[in-house]
Image (cartoon, helix red, strand yellow):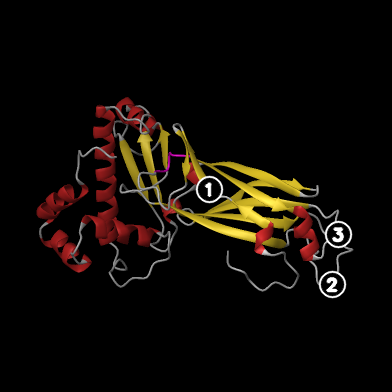
Amino acid sequence: MTRHALPYRVPSEEVVTAGDWSLVTEDGEVPMPQALPDWDYHMDLHLRRSVRVDLHRARSESGLPTDAVLMLAAVWTATGSNLSGPAQHMRMAGAGTTTIVLDITLRGSDLGGLLLLDTALVLAERRMDARPSSPRRAGSVLWSRRDALRLQGDAPQFPMAVIDFARTSFPDSAAWHLQISGSLESATMGSLLLLVNEKNTVTATAFENAGKPRPVDGIVLSAVYADAARSMVEHALGVDEFAEDADFPDGSLGATLLSLFARLFPGQSITDVRLRRRQSPALFASDLQAAVKIFEVPR
């Protein structure tokens, strides 16, 4: 934990003992890794951690009255979606040492990029009788810790929705469509949306079974991911601002497209690939087909 200078007293770090976050899966509980390479937007995350707090020391070392109510709170932020929110909070009004288990489930559709998990011990209620050097406002942070989990799979990452194409301007018989909107500075989460036609049962079923795909589901998902990657690369090459020396914000559409390009065309410059696309579109199409590894089953 990084200690910042605050305008009030805070307890020593030893007052709070936080265990590592664990990832809760169907097969049990495992330590949360630094990255989940196979994560995608239809995968919710179930996370758990145990936190022990010495309430007596937390209050006394902060100069707070013995009846001050404290709160342990967890907040999440996702750079890929530019979304954040409270995950869980627990009020603590007792004395002595207590152990709190934070158990949270985050929707995959809200996430993306780098997931930041902030755990904090805060003052739950405003204290008008606090000493001048003590925290008095509700929400004053006494202790905090930040953990991070990178959600960056090999396949293009985007939110999706299953809809009836007959009610849209898309062809009724189309299986899917990737919408790309906004500038390269926009958040990836708000710029990409994969639409799947519910009337195309083969494709819709493949995404329903994405967690445990059958062989046919794997082939369909591979085709969708390959086509989405193709659409993203062609969109990027059509924007003049898309260049090696561009500096796009973390979690932005531009940063996502640069990462995808580097993976698909390692060692090649954007200028060269853009020129090949203009001069020999048929050859470029074959190069891109090979790069996205169409019909390789996503892991």
Query: Residue 227, how many percent across, how many down?
Result: 25, 44
Look at the numbered discs 3 and 2 and tell me whether their residues touch, using CB distance below 8 Å: no
Q: Quadrant of the N terminus?
A: bottom right
Q: How many marks?
A: 3
Which of the 4 quarters of the picture holds residue 5?
Answer: bottom right
User: Spatial distance from mark 3 to mark 1, Cα to Cα?
Assistant: 31 Å
Q: Is residue 255 above or below residue 46?
A: below
Give the structural element (helix, strand or loop) at label 2: loop
The residue that mark 1 highlights is 21
| Amino acid type of the residue tagged 1 in the rendering | Trp
Q: Is residue 94 above or below residue 200?
A: below
Which of the 4 quarters of the picture holds residue 27?
Answer: top left
Mark 3 Cα shell of 10 Å, populated few (<14), some (14-19), many (≥20): some
Q: Is residue 231 visible?
A: yes
Q: Which residues are magenta?
A: 40-45
In percent of the image, x 11 and y 62: which residue is there?
279
Whether residue 34 sits left or right of residue 202 in the image: it is right
The one of 136 and 50 positioned closer to us in this rendering: 50
The residue that mark 2 highlights is 132
Look at the numbered discs 1 and 2 and tell me whether their residues touch, using CB distance below 8 Å: no
The one of 105 and 270 positioned closer to us in this rendering: 105
Give the structural element (helix, strand or loop) at label 1: loop
Choose the circle earlier in sequence order: 1 or 2.
1
The residue that mark 3 highlights is 65
Name the chief secondary structure element in magenta. Answer: loop
Mark 2 Cα shell of 10 Å, populated few (<14), some (14-19), many (≥20): few
User: Spatial distance from mark 1 to mark 2, Cα to Cα?
Assistant: 36 Å
Q: Quadrant of the C terminus?
A: top left
User: Spatial distance from mark 3 to mark 2, Cα to Cα?
Assistant: 13 Å
